Image: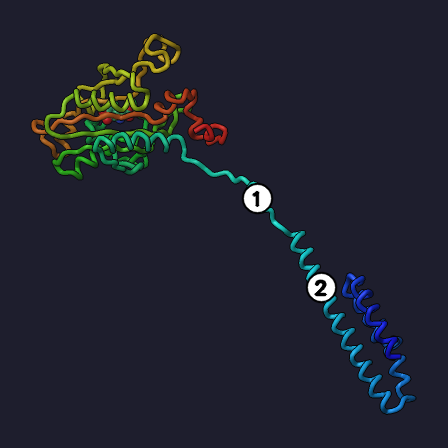
Amino acid sequence: MLKKLLLLKDQVEIDLNSANTINEVNEKKALYLGKKSPLQEIMATMKDLSIEERKEVGKAANEFRSFVEEKVQKRLNEINELQIQKKLESQAIDVTLPGRKFRTGSLHPLTKLTREIEDIFIGMGYTVEEGPEIEKDLYNFEMLNLPKGHPAREMQDSFYIDNNNLLRTHTSPVQVRTLLKRKGEPVKIICPGKVYRRDNDDATHSHQFMQIEGLVVDKNITMADLKGTLSLLCQKMFGEETNIRFRPSFFPFTEPSVEVDVSCFKCGSKGCSLCKGSGWIEVLGAGMVHPNVLRMAGYDPKVYQGFAFGLGIERFSMLMNSIDDIRHFYTNDPRFLRQF
Ligand code: DAH
């Protein structure tokens, strides 16, 4: 009988190792320790044995039971570990795979160009000023030498909010605001910003667009300073070879006033479709600050002179990038925006 148990031990190990699930292990356990197991058979015969034999058989039976239980537990642990291993493998992440792309936004082309132009002027010692988009008639027109009823007001058809306030039609009112703030001190500023006019939108007109205003007021400022400054700006924008020329013009807030042209960067001034055969392209308006503007803001025009200019940011960008329709800047089609 005892021999039988010893032989069974080998079989227990083989059987349990072939069990691959918890259920199978439990079935095997029942086979060796359950009601119909050889162990129970042996226990049933105990009552017919002598005390000596009973002791010996009892001890062997207990040992066998412990042995089986130990092997069962070992197999269960193994199965558990295998299952964890399998799960880990099936859920493994391959960190060497390329990541999923997600699209980042970018600055609007007008913001980008504004910052570029700001950098050029900051490099020349200018500071950047800002003014409100809802402006007083007083600053937008009156103190720029455009009294009520002045015919030049008609050139800038406006969105009025009430009799005294409107959406600014240009960035020039920031000239007035800055002069009033500096109270007779020298001024050297630019002001980028949005402006509004009651134009019908088409390829070259937009009811909303952007400008950069420039103003320098100090002693002994001449048109040569204006020309040098704008030459440098245009060379940085349109290329080192660029020349500029001044044509007489009229703005109520400057005297004399000029229209500034750049030599055509597309054809090298030979004449092409862009410059309409002239070799020159109009890019901005400028002039020497009108004595009335200085006087109204509290500056003595006998002591102080100044120059001013105003450029359209969309116009610059359209020229630099061959953009044929100003509305592209405001419809925000990603196919357009992605090109910048
Ligand atoms: N404010 C003018 C406009 O919007 C542009 C301009 C012209 C500004 C001459 C200036 C200047 O400062 O001197 O049409």
Residue 310 x %, y %: 27, 26
- Residue pictured at 46% horizontal, 37% vertical: 105
User: Is residue 96 among the parts visible in the rendering?
Assistant: yes
Q: Mark 2: is the Cβ under 8 angstroms from ligand 1?
A: no
Residue at figure coordinates x 76%, y 77% from the top left: 66
Residue position marked by numbered label 2 in the rendering = 78
Quarter of the rendering containing residue 33:
bottom right
Nearest the eye: 293 or 271: 271
- Real-space CA distance between mark 1 and mark 2, rounded to the nearest whole angstrom: 31 Å
Q: Is residue 324 left or right of residue 85?
A: left
Q: Which residue is tagged 1?
A: 96
Side of 267 where 243 appears, left or right: left
Q: x, y percentage for residue 14?
A: 81, 65
Q: Nearer the viewer, mark 1 or mark 2?
A: 2
Q: Is residue 270 above or below residue 115?
A: above
Please tell me which residue is depicted at 20% across the width and 36% down the height of the picture: 178
249 or 39, which lies in front? Answer: 39
Return the disc, 1 or 2, that comes first in the chain's sequence.
2
Give the SS element for disc 1: loop
Q: In terms of image quadrants, where is residue 240?
A: top left
Amino acid type for the residue under numbered disc 2: Glu
Question: x, y (%) of residue 288?
Answer: 17, 23
